[in-house]
Amino acid sequence: MQLQVKIVDYGFSDSLKRYFVTYHVTGLADEDLSRLAEQLEDPVVIKGNELYLNVYFEEEYYPFGTEDSKIRLEDYMAREEIEMTAYLLDLLQED
């Protein structure tokens, strides 16, 4: 498995009135995609063998809401991608 997670969008949704991060997940086998789609509580979209995951945050938990995150955005994005990768791998290892 060559799981890769990239943040493709983030910000504030005017229509939902919530902060969000959209992750693009690649490198998963079909059965892993199906398992994640069933296990994840946040909205997911599967296009071919790619998964798009929207995670919604209250303002105080939004990872890109601080001044420090604006100055060091690449570091914050990398950390969020690593954390999501670890979370997804943990879900896939549960039985």
Image (cartoon, rainbow, N blue to C red):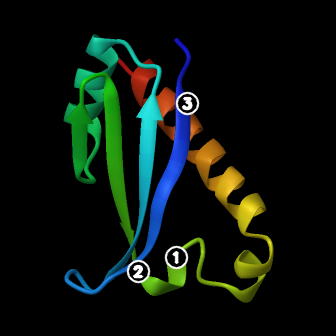
The image quadrant where one finds the C terminus is top left
Q: Say above or below: 76 vs 40.
A: below
Decide: marks 1, 2 in contact (CB < 8 A)? yes
Residue drawn at x 60%, y 75% is 64
Residue drawn at x 25%, y 45% is 44
Pinpoint residue 75: horizontal percent, then vertical percent: 77, 60
Disc sitting over residue 4 in the figure? 3
Three-letter code, disc 1:
Tyr
Residue drawn at x 22%, y 80% is 16
Three-letter code, disc 3:
Gln
Disc on the earlier residue, 3 or 2: 3
| Quarter where residue 77 is shown | bottom right
Pinpoint residue 43: horizontal percent, then vertical percent: 23, 52
Q: Secondary structure at mark 2?
A: loop
- Report crowding for label 1: few under 14, some 14 to 19, many 20 or more residues within 10 A (C-alpha): few
Disc sitting over residue 61 in the figure? 1
Q: Secondary structure at mark 3?
A: strand
- Report crowding for label 2: few under 14, some 14 to 19, many 20 or more residues within 10 A (C-alpha): few
Q: Say above or below: 71 vs 2.
A: below
Q: Which residue is mark 2?
A: 58
Pinpoint residue 2: horizontal percent, then vertical percent: 56, 17
Q: Say above or below: 15 vs 5.
A: below
Q: CA distance from mark 3 to mark 1?
A: 24 Å
Three-letter code, disc 2:
Glu
Disc sitting over residue 81 in the figure? none
The label nearer to you, 3 versus 2, is 3
Disc on the earlier residue, 3 or 1: 3
Q: CA distance from mark 3 to mark 2?
A: 26 Å
Q: CA distance from mark 1 to mark 2?
A: 6 Å
